[in-house]
Amino acid sequence: MGTVDICIGNNLIIDLDIFSLWVDGFTIDQCKTDILKKDPSARACKESIIIKDIIDNYHNFNRLEQYLQIPCRLREQLMFQVSEEMIEKLVERYYQYDPFVIREILNHKLTHKQRKDLDDIAEKTETRVRSCRRQFDNLRQIIRILDDLKGPIFRNIIENFCLPKALADDYTAIVFLARNQFDMSKRKLGYLVLDDFIYCANQMINNWSMSNTFENDTDFSRDFLLSFKELKILSEKEFIDEHKRLVLHGIAKVLNNNLTKDCRCLIIFEEMFKDLSRSLIDIAYSLNHSKDMKDLFFDLVERIIEPCKEAKVIKNEITIFLDEYRKKAHFVPDISKEYPKFSITFDKYILTISNCIIQMYH
Amino acid sequence: MPGKIKIGILKARNLPVMDRSSESSDAFVEVRFGTDNYYKTPVYKKSLDPEWNSRFFFEVEEDEIQEEPLQIRVLDHDTYSSHDAIGKVYIDLKPLLNPNGPSALNGFFPIFDTLHGIRGDVKVQARIEILSDCNEYRKSSSGVQFFTSSRVPEGFSLQNFCGFVEEMVLNDDPEYQWIDKIRAPRASNEARQKLFTKLSGEVQRRIGLKVLDMDANCVLGYQQYFDLEGEYGIVVRGIGTAANIVKQAGTCKSQIYPEITKPCKISPNRLSKKIHSDTDLNLQNLNNKQENQNHVLNHSISEKIEYPFLTLQQYPNGFIKSLCGIVCSRSVKLLNSNNDLDDLESRDKWWIEIRNEIRSHMKSLDCHVVLGYTETKSICEDVCVLSAFGTAAIVNQAFFTNVNKTIDENSLERCSLCHVPYNIAELPFPVALSPCSLCGQSQVPDVIFTSIQPIPEIPIIGKGSLIKAIVSRPRKKSSGEISAKVISDYLPFMEYELHRQLLGKLKIKGMNMLYGLRVQISIGENLLMAIAEATACFAAALPIPILPKIVNDKSSREFKEIEILKKALMEEMEKNIEFYDLGSELKPTQTAQTDSDSESKALLKIELDDYREKENIYQLMDSAARKNLPACSTEYMPGIAFSSNLQMFTSIYRCEAKLVQMNTKKFNEIFDYVLEGLSYKFRRYKNCVLANLSIDTSLFDDDHAMIILTGSCLTFGESTLDIKNNVEITNLSYVPNARIERYLGLVNLFLIRESTQIKENGGLSGFMHCFITEVLAMVRAHVLSLDGNALVSFKMTECVLLDNPHRNQGQCLINVTGDAVRIVK
């Protein structure tokens, strides 16, 4: 109706419902429909008034967005008078992500080109393009800012983006995945959801990276990865048979009661032991080469998980297997003579990787 | 006297990226004061958060500080081409001149650019060292405190009122100079910002000198106006009330009672001496006939003070003795009339004419003073309408002297303020009188209209309500003298129609008193518009309102229809009485059975001649008001005690007059729509009132109507809401549930914003939304820098929006004022 129709207050009073809808990329009209659906008190009002209120809010949000992109500036900016609690709510909501969208985004490099092609992702995940773009930009912005910073990702995210802990944890993992460019786009990985990757990434960050030093912790410690090379001795002839014996014995002990099901399990692992063990060691070996490392998830699925699944190994059984596999390796005679630090290195590797496998085994 | 300004330019943050390649800026700051003082900081390379830590000082004259703003300009250094401006900050140093004010100024200020808005903040410190000036011929008037709050400031007690002060300066508007044709709008707007800031400083300095001459120490209820007369220039006017106030020793929150026992500063002022003797007389004659007393008093005060006009809206207890009614004067003038006088003198003369007229109105009502006085001007091309408006009243003369004020306890009977101060035989104009409902002895009128804030002494029943009246009339496009004549012909009719609507609505509401009445006349090329808003309430002393009578001279053909109307009116009034809690004994009475003289005079008749009249009756009913949040046009709502300030809001509505066929009905719809929008916005909060609503309308040359509605959303009753603000801004002169500890000076910002990308930034709505947000941000920064935490009496005195949709351009000019204060909750 009017060419200007606005209402501004001294305090920024934000309708959080409308903010949510805005973050999700609703247009003004879609927003109105949603409000009418949810808020019975609005139904008594003229539509034009509801729309006007939405527009007022959207004006604020559009101005606010520049600060939301650098949330630490939100506290010192003078433009809006916003309460601390509100800032927290806004930031949390703004950085909320849709796991399906982020999963798709991580399939490709975060480039300008991908930003233009977000339509496909939007269609696939049934999300609005604007929402996809925001999630994409948020992720890219976080990575961009963190690029210049040293120290643990988690701490930097908390300090620079004022995110709540749980969300910062997730972003730490997502940033880690994106930076190391793990390949998650293979068809065989399609069954995995973002949470699986986040879990695995966190395992790697906590155990393999340099988070306790002042270096940037997205990078693995090179020396550390190189040390994985030494694990190769485990697949050498002289050790593998002994290891196999110990492991199978161990599994039998754990299973204890001789049900037919358990027998089957023992048989399977007996058959597969050499392949599995070799695969595990190969994967460790490949972590040195950044190109091979990108395929970590694919390798895990193709070489460990799929064969096991084909053999109808259930999650519990693989858990037992991996546990025994780790424990018994220390008892392989003479192995520490060949490589003195074997136990430490092996544990570091296999603990993390088994956790990942177990998480991905579904 | 020379003084020293010590300035520190410390650092900046969040600067914009001025150099794309390095994604940073090489910023430095230029500081100017007046014409001679200039300082430049070193360049801080490649940073968006530069730190200069430059400290330096300027030697200046005291009167310069009163007029000149400190100009801070942040630039991006460029080795090869000219430096790019990032933005500017104007800082008014006047608050530092006040001995009771803040000693230093320190804080982050948003860097404002007319084209890009706020771009980062710069941290500035300033301190003034000055020797006080005792020279009789001095130019400076520092030490005179200015308050925009239209009341005696909290924590101060009034010693005496000294009278009305006004000043006006005229200058060319840089936008209409020939050079404007060749320079960029940005440069032109910057020139305007600078000039207007300076002019308002000059007006204040000159008023200050007058105040010192009157032996007063402050200006209360200071009102500042910018009259943008286009090619005829710009007039900056200031009016206010000179007074003497002293800081109260104790910090009590109660209203200020004039309980001064210690001898005040003895001034050799003739004025006070004479009044002194008159007051003695006054006290002796206390029990004599009132009119006699009035006569004597009238004589004394209006002789001594040229214009006994007070711009305050709230007065100390015991000051007002009797309220007589609204006085108003309007005059239509042509800006280009070639008088022999120069421009400023002719404008001065116009205002003198108007003031004289107001004074004579006041005298004919046998009153001493005009309270709640305002002077406004509305301009359309070369025609302007000058208006002066106020409430004539009889007051306690002692407040004009320095002597101990004896409040006459007898006259402070609860209802005496409403009594008619005239002898029945000597009424200055016909009034319907009836015996006072409270004391039954004196006579009271049937309604009282005032332009001041509610007086707590007058007993009120029930709650108050907002009443508005709108009249709009199309007019033929004309110019010059014809246009002026058309307007002045229309004015009396519009005024009458406003009055009729106000009275009708008041009666249907079941109420009988108006507070805070404001009337605004706007003239456009094809349209004339008048808007009045007020807070209506039911004063216990005044008679129960009688419903408007519907008269029909025609045959009984329409008898049935009239009966329906009558019934509708009755029902409406009944609903109102219940809604506003006006008391169960109050029943709508249709007409008095006997047509006695006094009653018939008071009766509002509606003559039903045609269909239009019928519509008018429905318009008077204003039943939408009950659906929305309760609202009032005053700072206090009769019958409701506020507990907290939720939000101050500014609503702006602009539409094309042509498209919507602007008429009275349409305007009413727009207001209801805006109010409904506000009610919706605050729907989640309980117990809200929209207080101090003030409506500003302006009609633009290209037939746009803009309506600005400012107000405060306040809560009453127990509220769990506790809004923690860094800086509270309110258009009230107080903060509910808080005490003003200290007044830190006037904040007076003049800002212009332009854009060449209106469509890209959310249209004109987005542009205005952004600008107002920026203005509020800058106001808060100024308050914070003075060590304040609130701004009271916020007022947007000017808001002009121009646009050019074809070129995707827009420009807006805003002036805001208010008192920076420190509050304690």
Image (spheres, coloured by chain):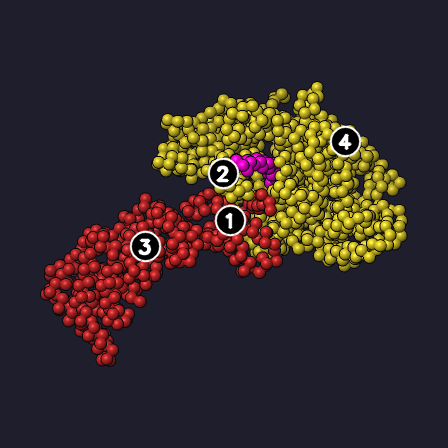
Chain colours: A red, B yellow
Q: Residue at x 70, y 24 (%)?
A: B337
* Dot 3 alpha-carbon crowd within 10 angstroms: few under 14, some 14 to 19, many 20 or more: some
Tag 1's secondary structure? helix
Label placed on residue B357: 4
Label placed on residue B757: 2
In magenta, the rendered stretch is B794-818
Q: Residue at x 14, y 63 (%)?
A: A235
Distance from disc 1 to disc 3, alpha carbons, whole Å, reads 32 Å
Front position among marks 1 and 3? 3
The answer to whether residue B672 shows anywhere in this view is: yes
| Amino acid type at image mark 1 | Tyr
Magenta stretch, main secondary structure class: strand
| Amino acid type at image mark 2 | Gln
Distance from disc 1 to disc 4, alpha carbons, whole Å, reads 51 Å
Pointers 1 and 2 within a single chain: no
| Amino acid type at image mark 3 | Asn
Q: Is residue B697 above or below residue A348?
A: above
Horizontal placement of A239 versus B678: left or right? left
Labels 2 and 4: the sequence-earlier one: 4
Distance from disc 4 to disc 3, alpha carbons, whole Å, reads 82 Å
Label placed on residue A106: none
* Dot 2 alpha-carbon crowd within 10 angstroms: few under 14, some 14 to 19, many 20 or more: some
Tag 2's secondary structure? loop
